[in-house]
Each structure stands twice: as C-alpha cells, then as structure tokens.
Amino acid sequence: MYGGGVFPPEPAHTLACLASCLARSPSLISRSSKGQRRMLPRVLLLSLLALPAALAATYKDNGGSSDLETTTKLRTHSLYAPYVDQELNNRWWDFGADTIINTNKHVRLTQDRQSEMGWIWSRLPISVPSYQVEFEFKVDGKSNSLYGDGFAMWLTTTRAKEGPVFGSTDKFNGLGIFFDTYANSRHSYTFPRVSVMLGDGSTPYDHAKDGQANEVAGCSQRFRRTDIASRGRFTYYKNNYIKLELQLKKWGEWEECFTTNVTMPRHPYLGFSAVTGDVHDAHDIISVSTHELVPRAASSSRPRVSPTGSSSWRSRSRSGRSGSGFAAWLGWLVKWIVIVTVLLVVAGFGRAWWMQRRNKRF
C-alpha cells in the first residue's frame, strides 16, 4: 500500500554538517578572496533563515485523530521497562509460553528459533468506552529471505489461551490485528502484511490463505527490520471507527494502515502474541501505552482521574516514562541541539568576519 523511497536526512546528519562548517570556518575565511569576504554577511543571514527549516526537520507528530483527545493514561493496560517488579511479577500483565523478559530492552515473545510461541495479556479488561493503544515493537532475525511467522495484537473477551493463530486461540470473540511476515499462498498484495479480523466466537481463521477470507481491512507495510523503532497506534472511537497507524520510516511520521467501522466487544482484554514455525524471527514488544479517548468538545469538562485512583498529576508523571513521552523528549532535545549548533555557526562566521575587518584596518 505504501511504497519505499529515499528517506529524508535525519537531524543527526544536519548537526554533523553544521559542526563541520563551524570547525572549518576560520580557515575558510582566512583563505577567501576579497569578493568572497563580502558575502559573509549574506552567509550569516542565510544561516538565520535556515534555522526554522532545521527545527521543522527535527520532530513532528502528524498522526492521531483530530476529533479525539487523549486524557487519562490507563496504567492497567500500559507496559514499559523494567516490565516486572523485584519478585519478577507484573501487577497488571501476565506472560506465558516461551516469552522471555529482558528488563532493560524488551519483552521477547519468540526468539529467532523454530516452533516457538509467546504471549502477554492484560489481567483486567479495558473499561472505558473509547481508547488508544500505542505500542513499540520489533521484528527481526538472521535470515534475509525466509522468515516468519509474525505477531498479533488482540482485543478479545477471553485472555491468555494459547493456540494456532499467531500464538493465540482460534475462533476468538473480538478483534485481532495480525502482523504477518510469511505468505502461505499467493496474493495480489505483498508481504509483510497487516490485517484485521473481527471474530464472532465461531468463525475460524483462514490459515491456508493467510486470513484473506476473514480480513476486514489491512495494508502491506515493511515493518520488519526498520531503520527506526517501529510503532503502532490503534484508535477505537465507540460507535464510529477503528483506525491503525504505523510509524516505520521516520520519527513522528505516521502512515494510516486502515480506518473502518466495526462493532467492538465491550470491555475487551488487551494482549500480544507471536509464533514461529519452520521459518522464524524474533518478535519483541518494547512498550505499550493506553489512554482513554474523549471527543475534543467534551475533553475539557472531563475529570482526569485514573481507574486506579491516582491523581491526574501522577498519571501524567508516569506517562513520561512511556515510549511516546521519550519520543517527545528526544525531539525536544534534538531541537535545542540544532538551535545551539546553528547559533555557534553564526557566531563563528561573525567572529571570523569581524577579525578580518579589524586586521584590514591595521
């Protein structure tokens, strides 16, 4: 659905170029001719004019829903490092099968080995009517040609049941979003593939054709072995739509995978699972951040009290440890690094130009 292309320059590249110019500016000016020295004021002006463009290239978030606003963070359905407490348990999540927890890096649902299966599930159902789940993940392995099978995100009425559908049970009741990296048959679209299925509790998943008969919506996206941290953002607006956006190419740039209207089960459990067969990959969940959603017109009148009874200030302070908070902090840091670097470049050129003018007088 979305083709490849040349990635735009990263902020780090811009910083390197500016630092290089700063380091060479005095020597360049000392060797410049009289005509070139006259252009120094123009260089300073152009540097100042380039500052807004440099800032715009640092970080932006163009995804999300304009008609909704995130309010309370649901700690009961959020997950981030170190994932477990001192007793190697998590108050709000269960882990099972071949899942391995690296407290500094990720929850690994499967290793890059054959015939593995792993899962994580929330212990409590989601009780708010509309919500958004943002999750960071990684799919990678040693093979460059054959790999699989993939992982799934679940919003279902049952939880923690192992099975053949990406590590979870078949004939489920609720929503399954499948990140499939291996095609069992030929299709008109390419793999890796992201697809969504609404289960009614009796319809089986179509393994032979990779769920093609069950697919409500989907997109083809290269979410395996990406250059940045892969992220997904699922939005459910009750009685309106569900939407999935993916961040795979550049920080803060989200691409819509699908938007459709389905009837979601009330109070579903949130889970992730993965499976490998003859082909294999490592499937990691790095963070999960879930928030309640309200219409923007009503958001200002809603009290910000979390379901666990903590105040809105505490909820916001904890949310700063999530992946989305880190991304915003990183964007802020890069922005100020760019500002300082550009100012140093301008100061370097200005000082060298002033020294040349002063030496000329004597």
Image (spheres, rainbow, N blue to C red):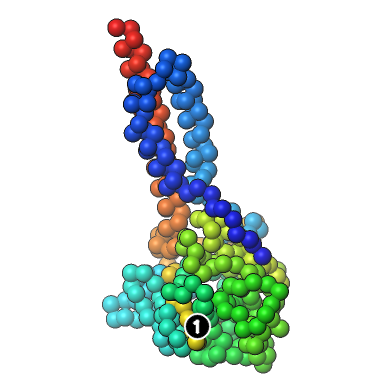
| Up-down relation of residue 99 to residue 59 (above or below) | below
In the image, taking residue 307 as reference, residue 235 lies left or right, namely: right
In the image, taking residue 232 as reference, residue 188 lies left or right, namely: right
SS for dot 1:
loop
- Can you give x and y, in whole percent of width and height, for residue 164 in the image? 55, 90
Question: Residue at position x 67%, y 92% from top?
Answer: 202
Question: Residue at position x 40%, y 69% from top?
Answer: 80
Q: What is the total number of numbered labels drawn onto the structure image? A: 1
Question: Residue at position x 54%, y 58% from top?
Answer: 249
Give the residue at mark 1: 279
The reply to whether residue 94 is visible in this rendering is no
The reply to whether residue 191 is visible in this rendering is yes
Question: Residue at position x 51%, y 45% from top?
Answer: 57
Of 123 and 311, the residue lying toward us = 123
| Residue farthest along the top direction in this orientation | 362
Which picture quadrant has residue 205? bottom right
- Can you give x and y, in whole percent of width and height, for residue 342 in the image? 42, 35
